[in-house]
Image (cartoon, coloured by chain):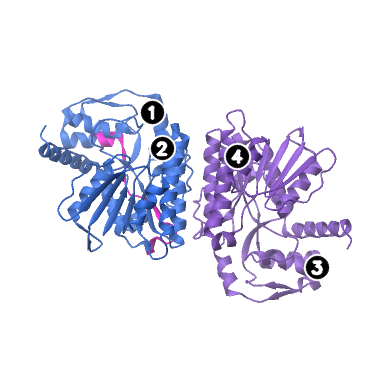
Chain colours: A blue, B purple
């Protein structure tokens, strides 16, 4: 099996590679090659028996995508995107990377002809939904995004459905919840604090909470996200019919519930490292985000979420402990 | 006022021009120029005081669209499309005309800069919806098209919303019902018989009815369609918020109700010219079409449908009588 990962250098991409390498086989066959494509070359050593081909390039360059597809990967994971804030600030870049990239990919696959119909797993986003919402948001609720990023993801979903319906590709689109706990440093995303209020206190640092404790959000762990990708690569897509894009199951948790779970798992002192500093701008952004979904369709198709938020925290702690052991610096 | 009509040579386009010429003014200002663009040059004489510039060209040619937009029309009606059957048969042509055409138009408008923000009225379609439906289909039901045509229209709606949200254009998308009674000859569209069973009997000819009498459909007259376009050009778009595309109100009528209206308006002999000849292929296609909508959002915004089906028939008869008087051949 040859596997292509677009956006392989990101957090989810790297974890997906780790999982594939650990599994060694997929869909009953050996994994021979993983091609890891991103704007920067992923620095990953090939384990025994699997060749990892790291390649840096631009997904909006049609000829680069054609060259990747010409190798006829059996499974393609398309995780590449510029994030919401950047797509909003740079209108042209957002459409070029997030829409043209997908369009080139689908066209390159179609042009390979009838003999080639790979599984394509595309990571969409709950940003395809915009307020006012139904509560909870079900699988027949319209995509009315309030950002260019959400618009680009919604268009990619429509294209994925149509190219799949026509038999050019075997697509599955999965709308990921907000991934918590992201490892590493805080970033400038408005959602960054959802990871920060867990990650920083566990690392002995103070975290800023810019919103009220009753704010509710839809989250999944990095491991759950990789689980969604693996299941999407292997599932029976006949069951999806013409609607190939699914809201992934997640945990709908409030900030108060997240902090209480942190207290249960790590104690009062750790949970006490969260400082409340309301930020009207972030509160307004977060108020416009969807909070709760009915993901029963994805659950019926075999996708499963984290059991509870305490488990998410424990998994993050185990990951961090493993890292420390792996590179003791 | 300068008005640009893309797809001006079609039935709706020509009726829109007639209406604009009859009104002479729009939004409180004189109409100076109507540019009528289509794949064939529309043969329309300029009435006194209004210049009609007919131009033939290809909407998928970026430079042609840029040249049209460079004249900075105040209002743009984008009616141009290849129909469902053709977009399904010719995948590339469908995307080129129905999607790239809109994309070029929006980009050309954006590139004119901040000083230019025209009203853009785009005709979408109820083909953006695909079975299984909610009943009736409301304004928060997802777009899950089952044709490439419907996919292209749904993508255009998302783009229109995003470009409007960003302030590049002042867009309104209107999803037209099936237009009945279309004048002229039957065509190869699966929906052709909806007009045929009224038009042919009134013209003294037999009409074939390929589906059962209890089939329900969503229809509007050509005059109502032009009314929708005019209202979309003039309405206060602030009220639309970020969701700028609306299902137009229509009449939800069964075949039996249509035939009964024909009997009331034109008598038993005319209504007797319909021959039932079930066609399994057409029955299957029609079964996949949406039948009934909740168009209350459009109604609240001031769009209004035909009062009843008998009125639609009477309007068609009046149109035909006027034609006969106008060109006595």
**In-image side of B318 versus A142 (left or right):** right
In which quadrant will I find the C terminus of chain A? Answer: top left
From mark 4 to mark 2, how far is it between C-alphas?
24 Å
**Crowd tier of the residue under label 4, counting other residues whose Cα lies within 10 Å: few below 14, some 14–19, many 20 or above:** many
Q: Which residues are magenta?
A: A238-259
Q: Magenta span has A327?
A: no
Chain to which the residue tagged by mark 2 belongs? A
The reply to whether discs 3 and 1 touch (Cβ–Cβ < 8 Å) is: no
Question: Which residue occupies the foreground of this view, A166 or B294?
Answer: A166
Question: Which residue occupies the foreground of this view, B65 or B13?
Answer: B65
Q: Which mark is residue B203?
A: 3
| Residue occupying the point 54% across, 61% down | B88
User: Which label's residue is closer to the chain start, 4 or 3?
Assistant: 4
**Crowd tier of the residue under label 3, counting other residues whose Cα lies within 10 Å: few below 14, some 14–19, many 20 or above:** few
| Residue occupying the point 38% across, 57% down | A171
Chain to which the residue tagged by mark 1 belongs? A
Residue B173, percent from left and from top: 60, 45
Residue B303, percent from left and from top: 67, 45
Mark 1 or mark 4: which is in front? Answer: 4
In which quadrant will I find the N terminus of chain A? Answer: bottom left
As drawn, B14 above or below B63: below
| Residue occupying the point 77% across, 68% down | B263
């Amino acid at each position: 099996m040859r596997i292509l990962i677009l956006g392989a250098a990101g957090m989810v991409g790297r974890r997906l590679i780790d999982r594939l390498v650990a599994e060694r086989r997929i869909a009953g066959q050996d994994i021979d090659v993983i091609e890891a494509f991103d704007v920067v070359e992923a620095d990953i050593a090939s384990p025994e028996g699997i060749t990892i081909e790291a390649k840096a390039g631009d997904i909006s360059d049609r000829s680069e995508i054609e060259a990747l597809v010409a190798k006829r990967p059996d499974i393609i994971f398309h995780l590449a995107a510029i994030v919401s804030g950047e797509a909003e600030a740079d209108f042209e870049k957002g459409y070029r990377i997030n829409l043209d990239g997908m369009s080139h990919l689908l066209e390159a696959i179609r042009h390979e002809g009838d003999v080639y119909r790979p599984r394509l797993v595309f990571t969409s986003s709950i940003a395809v939904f915009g307020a006012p919402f139904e509560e909870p948001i079900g699988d027949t609720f319209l995509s009315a995004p309030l950002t260019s990023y959400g618009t680009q993801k919604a268009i990619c979903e429509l294209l994925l459905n149509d190219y799949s319906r026509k038999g050019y590709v075997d697509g599955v689109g999965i709308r990921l919840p907000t991934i918590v706990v992201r490892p590493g440093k805080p970033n400038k995303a408005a959602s960054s604090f959802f990871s920060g209020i867990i990650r920083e206190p566990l690392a002995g640092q103070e975290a800023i909470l810019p919103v009220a404790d009753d704010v509710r959000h839809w989250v999944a762990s990095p491991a759950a996200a990789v689980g969604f990708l693996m299941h999407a690569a292997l599932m029976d897509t006949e069951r999806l019919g013409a609607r190939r894009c699914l809201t992934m199951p997640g945990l709908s948790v409030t900030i108060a519930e997240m902090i209480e779970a942190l207290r249960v798992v790590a104690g009062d002192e750790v949970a006490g490292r969260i400082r409340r500093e309301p930020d009207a701008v972030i509160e307004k952004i977060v108020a416009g985000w969807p909070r709760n979904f009915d993901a029963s369709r994805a659950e019926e198709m075999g996708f499963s979420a984290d059991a509870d938020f305490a488990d998410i925290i424990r998994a993050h702690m185990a990951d961090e402990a493993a890292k420390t052991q792996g590179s003791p610096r």
